[in-house]
Amino acid sequence: MLSKDIRNHFPILDQEINGHPLVYLDSAATSQKPVQVIEALDRYYRLDNSNVHRGVHTLGNRATDGYEGAREKVRKFINAKSTQEIIFVRGTTTALNTVAQSYGRANVAEGDEIVITHMEHHSNIIPWQQLAKETGAVLKYIDLEEDGTLSLEKVRETITNRTKIVSIMYVSNVLGTMNPIEEITKIAHEHGAIMCVDAAQAAPHVKLDVQKLDCDFLAFSGHKMCGPTGIGVLYGKKELLNAMEPVEFGGEMIDFVGLYESTWKELPWKFEGGTPIIAGAIGLGAAIDFLEEIGLDAIEQHEHELAGYAMEKMSEIDGLTIYGPTDPKKRAGLVTFNLNDVHPHDVATVLDMNGIAVRAGHHCAQPLMKWLECSSTARASFYLYNTTDDVDRLVEGLRTTKEYFNDVY
Amino acid sequence: MSTNKLDQLYRSVIMDHYKNPKNKGILESGNVTIDMNNPTCGDVIHLTMNVEDNIVKEVKFEGEGCSISMASASMMTQMIKGKTTEEAVKLAHTFSDMMLGKDLDDSIELDDLEALSGVAQFPARIKCATLSWKAMEKGVSGESQ
């Protein structure tokens, strides 16, 4: 377990909600921000704010150094070969849409296949639905095992020589399942398909290595990993990105502009039209520094232990159903559950009255909810600042919820 | 725990409607059908009505959702049955005002609906309470499917 002192870096956690100390268990939706990130944003706006890549003046140089310095931090963070492969975008959704609209439109034709799974987040479903509709391609879903994992047999059965794109989440935001991305990438490549990875729930918790995974694209958001909202990353292999057309056109991304024809800057800037997300990138860089100082391996270990502890304590509550793999080692730090026939919204409201923040709803995964045969669930998700005390508070809150609804029923 | 505030939300009348909903089911002979969902939370409602001569003769609902949304739907069906479409729309507006914490017109009989006034203190739950009313309003305004 990590030291409890880590909490002290997060000023927001030091407050009361409805008369109780806040227990924040919704980090899979968005993480809280350490003072190091808040100060980096503050410092940038107080001292260095300027537009990038054009300033002859000193502030312009500082902003450019900060922005491009953040790109190098991201490159190192995911072990990409070059900063040319790191494109700053608004978030995972924008990154996946960029792959679908740029790579997809150019490489997918009628009758080709796009393969995803039943556990995907809407952001890794709808861009492919749209692409399939536009091109006449077939969208195929890999079926899940009963415990909410993927089997490589079913992956092999679904991917064929007609498959052009395989796009799968690394870690499920509902089931907590960690998918065997490296193995799936091999299978995709054997069939000549490219592999795209939705790493939104992986980047905050797992050491990413795009060279080891050998994936072709990988997308994640800054705000789930202690960074600000509005900044995310699209990683792509250089040879693929080089061959792709930008999806946004305008300032910053151009080389020469004529009246009827223009040319693009080289990578990565050709994909970054308009004034880029400068402060966001600098904030993300500060978040990476913070996470790396603690160590991604230590964070992952901490979450496995917390999830294991939570599952053990929660399964002692009568009538509580936990979804996803039962082995804590096979899952990330989140527990999705339902409590008897108390609706998840009602659970979340009673917990909130006790100062505990959890998510209730379909978690942007309606097809998965259908697969689980429930309309919604509650979810407690953990991060590096959570402790076993937080889990104890959750369990106590759930017992209170149960008693409360037993009484009012 | 702030039990008092919770008790304002989960009054016994609400839990009664949740456990024993009124007018649950599908009206096979209905001439108005409305499906509506709350995309942020997954609550769904399937409303069937029989509207004749501008009067809501019959109404039934099917749905899935939390205690607040289902209890509100049950109360809604109870209240609008036999009302003219204008009266039904007016009730929907009154209910919407109640959710926004506005002062209400005393002349309107709220009956059980009054129990939902505590929802106004829980901003995240207002949409749960208003789903069935929005569906009804859409239906009686002639926007049926």
Image: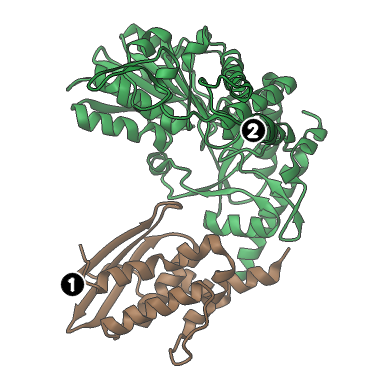
For badge 1, the amino acid type reads Ser
Q: To which chain does the residue with label 1 belong?
A: B
Helix, strand or loop for disc 2: loop
In the image, A290 versus A154, the foreground residue is A290
Which residue is identified by label 2? Answer: A226
* Depth order, front residue of A72/B45: A72
Image quadrant in which you'd find residue A168: top left
Q: Give the quadrant of the N terminus of chain B.
A: bottom right
Image x and y of residue A193, in percent:
32, 13
Question: Taking the image as drawn, is residue A186 in sight?
Answer: yes
* Left or right: A139 as drawn, with respect to A290: left
Residue type at tag 2: Cys
Where is the C terminus of chain B found, in terms of image quarters? Answer: bottom left
For label 1, the SS is loop
The residue marked by circle 2 belongs to what chain?
A: A
- Residue B86 in the image: state x and y as whole percent: 28, 83
Residue located at (64% from left, 72% from top) = B7
The chain that appears brown in the image is: B
Q: Residues within 10 Å of mark 2 (few under 14, many from 20)?
A: many
The label shown at residue B29 is 1
Along the line of sight, the residue nearer the viewer: A241 or A224: A241
Say the numbered circle drawn on residue A283.
none
Give a yes or no on whether discs 2 and 1 share a subunit: no
Residue at the bottom extreme of this rendering: B107
Q: Is residue B28 visible?
A: no
Furthest toward the front, the residue is A56
| A124 to the left or right of A385 | left
On screen, residue B7 above or below A281: below
User: What residue is drawn where x is 65% and y is 56%?
Assistant: A352
